[in-house]
Image (cartoon, helix red, strand yellow):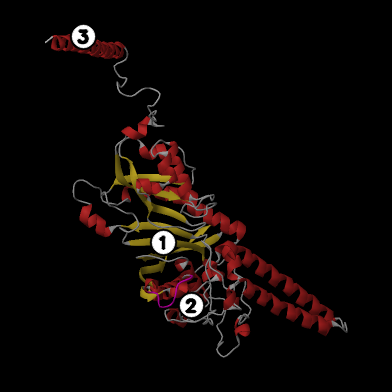
Amino acid sequence: MRILLRTLRWQKRHFGHTFCNMKTESVGETEAQSSNVMNVSDGSRKRPLSISSSTQEPTEEPKNPKLEKVKRKKMAVLLAYSGSGYLGMQRNPGMKTIEEDLLGAMKSANLISEEAYEHPQEIQFQRAARTDKGVSAARQIVSLKLPCEGPVVESINEYLPPQIRVIGMKRVTKGFNSKSACDARTYSYMLPTFALEPSVVPQERSGESQEAKLQPSSQPAEPKEDFRLPPEALARVNEILKLFEGTHNFHNFTSRKKPLDPSAQRYILSMKCGEPEVYDDIEFSTITVKGQSFMLHQIRKMVGLAIAVLRGLTSSETIAKAWKTERLDIPVAPSLGLVLEEVHYDKYNRKFGNDGMHDALDWSEYDEEINVFKKEFISSMIIKVEKEEKSMFNWLQTLPFHSYDAREQHINQGSDDDSVDKESSRVEAKQSSSLEVKVREDVFNDESSSSSGNPSSSESLSHGLRTLANAAEAVSGRSGLGDPAKDVPNGQ
C-alpha cells in the first residue's frame, strides 16, 4: 500500500511538471504568432503574409501601358508608295523595304509593341501582293490587328517618308487574310511609246546555229524619243496584248518554274494599252493587265515579248509557242514602269460587305487622293528616271541579242533564268550599248584607213568584225543565253 502511494505521488510530480511545461510552450507560441499577425496588420496591407520580400519575384511593368488598354480589331489598310530606292515590299533583314518602314512607323506611333514589330505574325500581318525592287503601288492592301479608334492613319503617316502614305483603313472579319481573300490584281506598266515603234524587219532564223541566232537579224534602228504612236499602231499593240488573255501555261514568263508545274497555269482577264500622253517631250502610254495572280517577273516578260513582236524581232507565233513545254529565251522589260494598281475582293464584298458589321473593301472614295499621290510620286518618278537613266531606251538595244527560241534544257529541269536578274539588267544594257558604240567606231576607223590605201586595212577590218562578234558573245554570256548550264537562280 505504501509502495502504491509513493508511485502515485511520483507520477503526479513528474507528469504534472511536464504538462505545465508543454502548456507554457504552447501559450508562448500562440502569443508569438499573435504578435506577428499584429505586426503585419500594423504595416502595409498590400504586402502578402506568407511570402517574404526576399523570395518574391519582381513583376515587370509593361513598357508602354497604352498598348495594353487599346482595343484591337482586324483591319485592312490601304497604302500607296513609290518603289524608288526600296528593295521591294517584303521585309528583308538589313535591307530597305516598304514593310520595314511601315512597321517601324506603327511602332513609333505606339500602335504595335516591340514584339509585334520584331514578329509581325503576332498581329497577323499579311500583304496582298509582294512587289519587287523598284516597283510602286497605288492601292496595296495589308491586313493586321490595329486599334480601331482614334487618328490611326494620321499617326502612322507622321512617321513615314513622303513617298509612302497610308490612305485609309477598314474593319474586316477576324479571319480575313489580304492575300488569300484576293480575287484578282490589276497592274499597270508605263513606258515610252518609242518602244512600240516597228523598227526591225523579222527574218527567218530556223536552222541556224545557236551562236548565229544570238546575232541581230538586222541592224535595229535607234529608238527616237520624239516618236508619236499613231492610232493604227495602237490598235496593233492591243491586238498583240490580247493574245495573252485567258488561261495559259506561263512557265516561260517566270524563273525556276518547271514546264509541267500546275502552278504555272494562270488566268489573265484583260490586257490592253491606253491612249498615249506627252510628258516632258516624251510620249508615254500605259499597259493595264488584270489577272487572278501573277508569278515573279511574269508581267515584265509579257511586256518584253510583246515589244519584241511589235518591233519585228520575232513573230506573234512565239507567244503561242511559249505556252508549250519548251523553254524559250524571252527578255524581261525593266521594272521601272510597273505599278500595282488595285487588289480586288469581289467575293469578300458580296459575303461580308453588307452584313452591318464590316465594311466593303471598295476604296473609290479615296480615288482623288490616290491620283494626286500617283502624279506626284509615281508617274513623275517614272518619267524622270527614264529621261535621266534611259532605262527603256538602253534595254531596247539588247533585244536583238535574244534568240526567242527554245533552249537546250530538259523538260523536267527547273528553269533558272539569269537573264531576268533585275539587279544587272540596267548595267547589262548600258554595257552592251557602250560595246556596240565602241565597235562601230572601230569599224568606221578601219573602213577609213582602207579607203586611204593602208596595206593593213583589211586586217583591221577583220579585227573590227571579230570584235563585233565578241561583243555579241559577251552580251549573250552575261545574260546566260549561250550556255543554259550557266544559268543561275534569279534574285528577288
Residue receiving disc 3: 13
Q: Residues within 10 Å of mark 1 (few under 14, many from 20)?
A: many
Q: CA distance from mark 3 to mark 1?
A: 108 Å
Q: Is residue 469 magenta?
A: no
Quarter where residue 466 is shown:
bottom right
Q: Residues within 10 Å of mark 2 (few under 14, many from 20)?
A: few
Instruction: Name the residue furthest bottom.
Output: 207
Q: Residues within 10 Å of mark 3 (few under 14, many from 20)?
A: few
Q: Secondary structure at mark 2?
A: loop
Front: mark 1 or 2: 2
Q: Which residues are magenta?
A: 255-261
Residue receiving disc 1: 187
Q: Is residue 147 left or right of residue 317?
A: left
Of the numbered discs in the image, which one, if any, rests on residue 413? 2
Q: Secondary structure at mark 1?
A: strand
Q: Which of marks 2 and 3 precedes in the sequence?
A: 3
Residue depicted at 46% across the width and 54% down the height: 90
Query: Label 2 sits on what residue type?
Result: Gln
Establish if 38 lies above or below 248. Answer: above
Front: mark 3 or 2: 3
Give the x, y percent position of residue 332: 52, 69
Q: CA distance from mark 3 to mark 2?
A: 106 Å
Identify which residue, 220 or 91, lies in the foreground: 91
Q: Is residue 102 left or right of residue 390?
A: left
Query: Label 1 sits on what residue type?
Result: Tyr
- Asked whether the viewer can see residue 225, the reply is no
Q: Is residue 260 magenta?
A: yes
Residue depicted at 33% across the width and 44% down the height: 145
Give the x, y percent position of residue 237: 45, 72
Q: Which of marks 1 and 3 precedes in the sequence?
A: 3
Give the x, y percent position of residue 129: 40, 57
